[in-house]
Image (tube, rainbow, N blue to C red):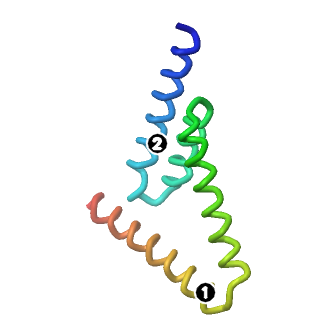
Amino acid sequence: MGRFGVKIAVALIGTLVIAVGVVLLPLPGPGWVIILGGLAILALEFHWAKRLLHFTREQLLRWTRLVREGSWLVRIVSVGGLLLVVGGALLLSLRMLA
């Protein structure tokens, strides 16, 4: 029961952390970071979570490399898109709180 109990505990804690991150997504704050933290917890015991975390990390590194080494147009569009997403999340948050 020991190994199976650890697997269940990790699954419950990781899922709970991911759920908190999903709830925080529309609010200004570290929703994605919390979701990735929950995925990292799941990756301690589950191979599929480890592969998904690796894939996500590779995509994030690829995106940052593209922005860092890209032309000024790529940088402006990337930062502009990020600002639109953050601004949209902030507006939705303010409407939900009002």
| Amino acid marked by disc 1 | Val
Which quadrant holds residue 75? Answer: bottom right
- The residue labelled by disc 2 is 18
Q: Position of residue 27 (x, y in %)?
A: 41, 57
- The residue labelled by disc 1 is 74
> Residue at horizontal 67%, vertical 71%?
64
- How many numbered callouts? 2
The reply to whether callout 2 and callout 1 are in contact (CB within 8 Å) is: no
- Mark 2: secondary structure: helix
Up/down of 41 relative to 53, above or below: above
Left or right: where 90 falls relative to 33: left
Q: Position of residue 57 (x, y in %)?
A: 64, 56
> Residue at horizontal 58%, vertical 43%?
37
Q: Where is residue 59 in the image (x, y as percent from the top left)?
A: 61, 63
Q: Position of residue 8 (x, y in %)?
A: 48, 21
Up/down of 43 relative to 90, above or below: above
Which of the pair 45/78 is nearer the observer?
45
- Mark 1: secondary structure: helix
Up/down of 96 relative to 65, above or below: above
Furthest residue toward right: 69
